[in-house]
Image: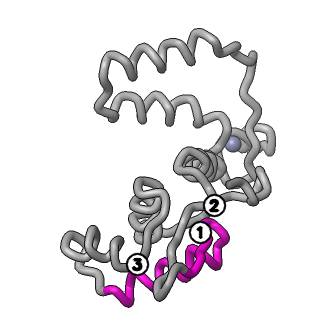
Amino acid sequence: MNTLVESEPIKISDSEWEVMRVVWTKGKTDAKTINNLLSHSKGWKLATIKTLLGRLVKKDVLQTEQSGKKFVYSAKVTEEQTVRSATENIFSHICAKKVGSTIADMISEAELSQEDIDNIEDALLKKSPVTDVACNCIPGQCICKEDEMGE
Ligand SMILES: [Zn+2]
């Protein structure tokens, strides 16, 4: 399942993600099944699905095997790994000092069940704070270092 290097980010487009969700749900599936499920709501043709599947194989997140006349696809990465990679990717684009307030915003915006809130509270209780979150930006990319650089 896990042939990707741990640090290698999994980068898939929004459309590719829609296809992956079907593969994760079905386990093993083929282009026609994905097409039956997605073509109506997405307005995609079978050729579009096949293109997306080809890209996903190229990106090494899908594997394919021939079964009779058709190609059967299965995932090489889990949904959890992919979501985690996307989240890490978003956080890599912001100053480390802003990650905390971004998470707080995300929590405020999200629709959450009591179970979700309990899980988040558990995660927070287990977290040990650092005295000062270090800025990881290139000077000029955030305001943290503006003061150090002097006016
Ligand atoms: Zn910064």
User: What is the quadrant of residue 15 in the picture?
Assistant: bottom left
| Magenta region includes residue 65 | yes
Q: Measure the alpha-carbon separation of dots 1 and 2.
A: 5 Å
**In terms of secondary structure, what is the magenta stretch mainly?**
helix
Which residue, given by chain and number where applicable, does mark 1 sit on?
62
Count of all numbered marks drawn on residues in the image: 3
Residue 123: percent from left, percent from top: 56, 18
* Residue bounds of the magenta highlight: 46-66
Mark toward the start of the polypeptide (1 vs 3): 3
Query: Left or right: where does residue 110 sit relative to residue 28?
Result: left
Ligand 1 is in which quadrant of the figure?
top right
Alpha-carbon span between mark 3 and mark 2: 17 Å
Q: Is residue 10 magenta?
A: no
Give the labeled residue for mark 3: 31
Q: At 55% across and 65% down in the image, what residue appears?
A: 74
Left or right? Give the position of 113 relative to 53.
Answer: left
**What residue would you read off at disc 2?**
76
Q: Point out residue 60 in the picture as x, y percentages from the top left corner.
A: 67, 70
> Type of residue at label 1?
Leu
Q: Quadrant of residue 26?
A: bottom left
**Going by the picture, which residue comes out furthest to the front?**
68
- Amino acid carrying mark 2 in the image: Lys
**Above or below for 29 versus 50:** above
Residue 92 numbered mark, or none: none
Q: Is residue 31 above or below residue 24?
A: below
- 70 or 128, nearer to the observer: 70
